[in-house]
Image (spheres, rainbow, N blue to C red):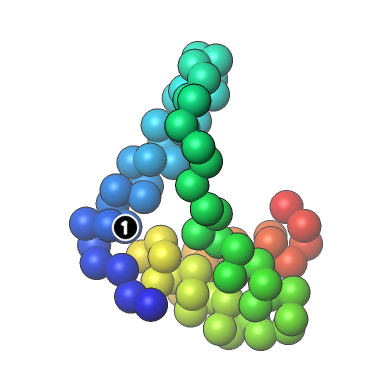
Amino acid sequence: MRHDPTLQALARIERKLDLVMRHLAIADHAPPEPDPFTEVRDLARRGKKIQAIKAYREITGTGLKEAKDAVDRMEAGH
């Protein structure tokens, strides 16, 4: 699944807004959205690291090294 740059930018903005809301203790009463990284974690757990890195890059638009580092952290349980 490939995301366009606008969707990637929107996802980054939403993550930042979530951090600000948490910092200010502002509650969001909307139902939570599904975690877009569930598939990435599942692939990493099943030993499919290359596919996990590819999926992470498609979701976030990050470079190869950043995606690999993120998947490594997921594998380590962080």
In the picture of the structure, the residue carrying the numbered disc 1 is: 8
Q: In this orientation, does residue 17 appear?
A: yes
Image spot of residue 34 (x, y percent): 52, 53
Residue 8 in the image: above or below residue 10: below
Packing grade of label 1 (10 A; few <14, some 14-19, many >=20) is some
**Residue under the image location 46 percent in, 32 percent down:** 30
Q: What element does badge 1 sit on?
A: helix
Give the mark count.
1
Residue 69 % position (x, y): 60, 65
> What amino acid type should be assigned to the residue bearing mark 1?
Gln
- Left or right placement of residue 24 versus residue 61 in this view: right
Of 29 and 3, which appears nearest the observer? 29
Residue 44 in the image, given as x and y percentages of width and height: 68, 75
Residue 39 is left or right of residue 10, and the answer is right
Report if residue 63 is visible in the image: no
Q: Quadrant of residue 60?
A: bottom left
Q: Which residue appears at 36% of the width and 65% of the height?
A: 61
x 54%, y 24%: residue: 22
Residue situated in front as seen by the camera: 28 or 7: 28
Tell me where residue 42 sits by quadrant.
Answer: bottom right
Could you tell me which residue is drawn at 21 percent across and 57 percent down?
A: 6
Task: Tell me the quarter of the image containing the N terminus.
Answer: bottom left
Percent x, y for residue 58? Answer: 40, 71
Image position of 48 with respect to 29: above or below: below
